Amino acid sequence: MRRNFRLNRKIILYSLLLVSAVFGLCSCLTTARKDNYPYIWLTNNTKYILLSPDNIEKPLDGFQRISASFDGQFYQMNTWVKADETGIDMTLLNEMGANMGELSFRGSDISFSSAVFPSSMRPEYIVADFQFCFYSIDALTEALKKSGLLITETGDKRQIFQGNSIIIEITKDNNSVIINNHLRGYSYTLEGDF
């Protein structure tokens, strides 16, 4: 009887160790997956994890003209955007129609290739701005709330706040979207059929 007790005790101990190892491995895998999900630093200490593509308000498939201003410089380019619940695809074009770069976003996968733009350019920031403009206000509200930020929508205007400070302001109508990032000091206008 004493022998059975020792044997049962060993079985129970090994079972507990095995269960602990499995739970530990699963928790490490879960953490790694979250850490690898695309994100941006919306403020210096606030991480925004990109939303899945199925949060788009309505599908887009068409030509857009981009006029951007950053650090005293002015840029213009064209882009073809196809965005729906499966993802975002952008082809950046110069004035002559030559390909300047391509971006693809599929939820947890994002890629950007360009012979013109620096390799340090993070496509996550382009996708985040796109989401702030064209994704569901309810989904954005929930995601930004987790980051300690607030988004409001009044008529054709969206504003993202950190406390009482507006960090991003977006104004939309049927033919244009104007994005002002007050915190980072850039703005751009998208022209197209929205």
Image: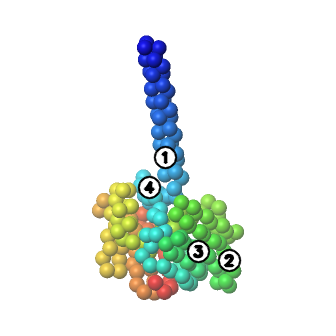
The image shows residue 190 at horizontal and vertical percentages of 50, 80
Q: What's under tag 1, amino acid-wise?
A: Thr
> Mark 4 Cα within 10 Å, few/some/many (few <14, many 20+)?
some
Disc 4 from disc 2: Cα separation: 31 Å
Query: In the rendered image of this protein, does residue 194 appear above or below residue 141?
Result: below
Residue type, numbered disc 4:
Lys
Q: Residue at x 44, y 79 (%)?
A: 58
Three-letter code for the amino acid on which mark 2 is drawn: Asn
Question: Which residue is the site of mark 4?
Answer: 47
- According to the picture, the residue beneath numbered tag 2 turns out to be 99
Spatial separation of the CA atoms under disc 3 and disc 4: 24 Å
For mark 1, give the secondary structure. Answer: helix
Question: Is label 2 in a helix, a strand or a loop?
Answer: strand
As shown in the figure, which amino acid type bears the numbered disc 3?
A: Met
How far apart are the two marked residues, 3 and 1, measured between alpha carbons?
A: 30 Å
Q: Report the mark closest to the observer, 1 or 2.
A: 1
Q: Where is mark 3, residue-wise?
A: 90
Local secondary structure at mark 4: strand
